[in-house]
Image (cartoon, rainbow, N blue to C red):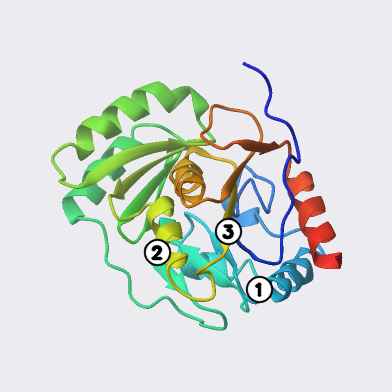
Amino acid sequence: MPRIPERSFTLSAHDAVFLDFDGTLAALQDDAETVWLADGMAPILEACADRLDGALAIISGRDADDLARRVPQSLWRFGNHGLRVLAPDEHSGGNMTAAPHQLIEAVSDIAGRYPGVRVEPKGQVLAVHYRATPSAEAELGIALRQAIQPFAGYSLQHGKMVYEAKPAAANKGDCLLRAISREPFAGRRPVMIGDDTTDEDAFIAAQSAGGIAVKIGDGKTAARHHMATVDDVHALLREFASE
């Protein structure tokens, strides 16, 4: 399969830009708690948002309050795969509805069988991280898929060293489509930039709405554009901010 051309697009002040966080704005780390924006990127993001009249959002699987600690408060922040939204300068996403207790117990029991595997509750979403025990990937996935079957509306999504048990509403694509139906995103070309399988729904949504999708790194994707690394994303944003 031919490689998708790099930087085969440009950003416009008339776009609505949606950026994933981990692996897109900030490099992945073994410990997710150590993932932060690179020095100097916060003002770049704010400058980009100014050029876009506020139509820039960070869209992440992280809990919205956790995401808010890592990016400028002046930006839109869509956390929990779009289940929780923080508007600019909003400081709390409010109380979260938890995943079903029986599901939490079942997932925690499975994770406990593998040293180094940990469960991160994110409201209705349960993330099971296995970066410390990559050999558990196949068995863990089989066990988790079986465990969530009794829970209507839940599915298992496989990302980079993580499985996530998610309700149907936790979907970045649906989140993006809701966003572009309202200000400040309405009437603009949506641009979605992400790196993981959790971004694929948003890639499809952006392109179906006449926008563009950009995949960071290698791997099968619906996105029609490609950039290689987080550094390339930073370069794109710096250029746009300085135009």
**Disc 3 on helix, strand or loop?**
strand
Q: Closer to the camera: disc 3 or disc 2?
A: 3
Task: Tell me if mark 1 has few (under 14), some (14-19) or many (20+) residues whose alpha carbon lies within 10 angstroms of its own.
Answer: some
Identified by mark 1, the residue type is Pro
- Say whether residue 102 is visible: yes
Q: Earlier in the sequence, mark 3 or mark 2?
A: 2
Measuring from the top left, give residue 61's x and y in whole percent.
Answer: 47, 54
The residue at 71%/76% (across/down) is 50
Identified by mark 2, the residue type is Arg
- Distance from the alpha carbon under mark 1 to that under mark 3: 23 Å
Q: Quadrant of the N terminus?
A: top right
Q: Is residue 48 above or below residue 218?
A: below
**Disc 1 on helix, strand or loop?**
loop
Q: Is residue 84 above or below residue 154?
A: below
Res. 198 mark: none
**Disc 2 on helix, strand or loop?**
helix
Q: Earlier in the sequence, mark 1 or mark 3?
A: 1
- Contact flag, marks 3 and 2 (Cβ < 8 Å): no
Measuring from the top left, give residue 139's x and y in whole percent.
Answer: 35, 23
Q: Can you identify the residue that label 3 sits on?
A: 189
Q: Earlier in the sequence, mark 1 or mark 2?
A: 1
Res. 178 mark: 2
Q: Can you identify the residue that label 1 sits on?
A: 72
Q: Closer to the camera: disc 1 or disc 3?
A: 3
- Distance from the alpha carbon under mark 3 to that under mark 2: 14 Å
Q: Residue 115 is drawn in which quadrant?
A: top left
Task: Tell me if mark 3 has few (under 14), some (14-19) or many (20+) residues whose alpha carbon lies within 10 angstroms of its own.
Answer: many
